[in-house]
Amino acid sequence: MASSSSHGVLPHCGLNDSDLVECLSDSTGDRNNVILDTSCDSTANNEVEEFIEGFDDSFSNSAQLWVPNLPDTNLKPYPGQRFSDLEDACTFYTNYATTVGFNVRRETQRVRGSIVIHKYVVCSKSGTHDTSMSIISDNSSELSHVSASVGGPKKKKRKTVTKKCGCNAKIVIKNDGNGHFVIDRFIEVHNHPMVTEFGKQFLRANRSMNAVHRKFVVDAATTNLGSYRAHALFKSLTGSYSEVGATAKDFQNWMRDVKLFIGKRDVDMLIEKFKTKKETSDGGFFYEYETDSNGHLTRIFWADVQGRQSYDIFGDVISFDATYRTNKYGMVFVPFIGVDNHWKSITFAACLLNHEDITNFTWACEMFLKVFQRPPWCLITDQCPAMKVAIAETFPDSVVHRYCMWHIMQKFPAKIGAVFCAESEFMKKLNKFVWSSHISVAEFEEGWSSVLKEFELIARFCTLKLGSTIQDSEGYKTRDTSKKVWNEFQGCLGDVSYNKDGLEFLLEELKFLRIRVKQKVKNPCATKDDILQEIYGVRPSTSIIVHPPLQSNNKGCRKRIIGHAERSCDGKDRPKRVCKHCNVKAFHDSRNCPMKGEQLQVNPLANGLNVNVQGSAPPTLNVENLVNVNVQGFVPPNLNVEKSV
């Protein structure tokens, strides 16, 4: 039997300590609840459904009372308990509620000037719902009158997650006048049971979206992972759904807030972020953009400090590629890429273009020369005619323009014969020297010549001139503080991952460290907009200056034209469907029916509503009975449909 309350008379039911001796434990065996049965009716409902948050409204009329059972009395509030500020008092009662199994709600407060005098924190089941209903009726609709006469007026009821049942459990926090807050009243008894141990994970206080959840959802969205997949992935990382701390719906709601925060101001936010980077980098960050006559973005170019420094060292040969389309507007993403001394790709600059034409490529090359001040020694591109013209017009004649090796190697079968390349060892031996990045120029020339002599082929090739070797200076390493903390935690977890004692020691140290962090560091309250501004680094403006770009339609974006022969082969195994317009089994539907513009013969037996819509009821057809066919789903005996047709 659970112990009784130690605070004298219970405010809610008027029972003293002696009355609590006869309290009976819940028949379900839930240790979180102690039932106070003050009813003499033996037919009272003793079976309580297991639930998570929603309670039945019948609890408000029940004579049973529940006292939460809390073994640790240090977590239980009591009258006279003192706190340094109001937030600590509210947090203490919230932690108590989540421990025993109920939600809380911050109610009204009394304020004198700007100082809070009284604050009420109540159970989430306190109060009652508004029972008023709004009747939905449409006088212009004939079917609405039929439905009203058959089933009565339709009522609209607001959906709620938590049902109120008039619970009086609460605490009243009072300002003592010395800058501290004291619990003035504490009502412990509830008129509803507490949630089970399994249901505690779904309490509102136990499923809040913290900073880790928010950042994880945003990072998952950048890799094309939706909110539900992000929740499943987070569950796999933590071990179970109960350890996630939020539901999949919470993840989805946060992603909804992110989309509402950005809206149609994504281009404005991008330009504002570029502007901030340029100001904070003392001009090291460069960006330039252009818009059309209506203010829509057409092209944008940018280069950061690290890319500009890398170009000074590794900018002899760059790749100018325009095959990336990873944005929803279909714009062409064009990166300027090089290779460092570790054979790793590095990005010097990038741009977004709305079209792959000479004008856009020329503008991109001009911006490249504007920011880097000197042209590269060699440019490697794909075989794009517009890009070839733009490079010839923008860069000087000293710049060597070459096609990428992949396109060159793809032309070998067409130039020397596909059968020869497939049946001989020519391509295999040639690739041995072409795709090797660790051989010298002399070894490449010797291997190339040996392959040509072996197969008696005459070919022309170019050799790139190697520049002098430059020692790389120590680069700038910028890492976010949160990433450092995460890496340290992962390192500690990896050190003790297979040691049970080590894991328990790490867990206790982390708990102690978390308590110290809460005591030393006060986390300021922030709105959703403040949190999103911290994540994206910029707050969207109220007015849109630069509108999002229009949908681009470049080469490779269109669908392939399917011929009649292929279309007939693909559709021969497709099942036919009944068209709702012509009532014929075919491959079309009511949207693209070929007889859509023609007057059809009405078949009342197939669809009685067609008679009402067309307004062409036969003389012997009773429209009133026809409505009954649609509503009730049966044909009256006195209606002979065949004769009427």
Image (cartoon, grey):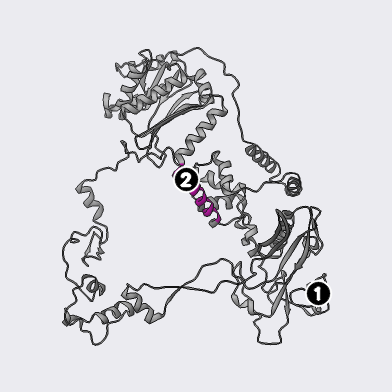
Labelled pair 1, 2 in contact (Cβ < 8 Å): no
| Location of residue 633 in the rendering, given as x and y in whole percent from the top left corner | 32, 79
Q: Is residue 363 above or below residue 65?
A: above
The question of residue 251 being in magenta is answered with yes
Q: Which residue is mark 1?
A: 9
Residue 87, quarter of the rendered image: bottom right
**Quick one: 309 or 65, which is closer to the camera?**
65
Q: Residue at position x 68%, y 80% from top?
A: 63
Residue 389 horizontal side relative to residue 366, left or right? left
| Location of residue 387 in the rendering, given as x and y in whole percent from the top left corner | 33, 25
Q: Which residue is mark 2?
A: 224
Give the overall secondary structure of the magenta segment: helix
The question of residue 320 being in magenta is answered with no
Residue 119 horizontal side relative to residue 467, left or right? right
**Quick one: 622 or 484, which is closer to the camera?**
622
Amino acid type at mark 1: Val
Which residues are drawn in magenta?
250-265
Residue 542 horizontal side relative to residue 126, left or right? left
**Quick one: 294 or 629, which is closer to the camera?**
294
Specify few, some or many for label 2: CA neighbours under 10 Å numbering under 14, 14-19, or 20 or more: few
Q: Residue at position x 51%, y 22% from top?
A: 308
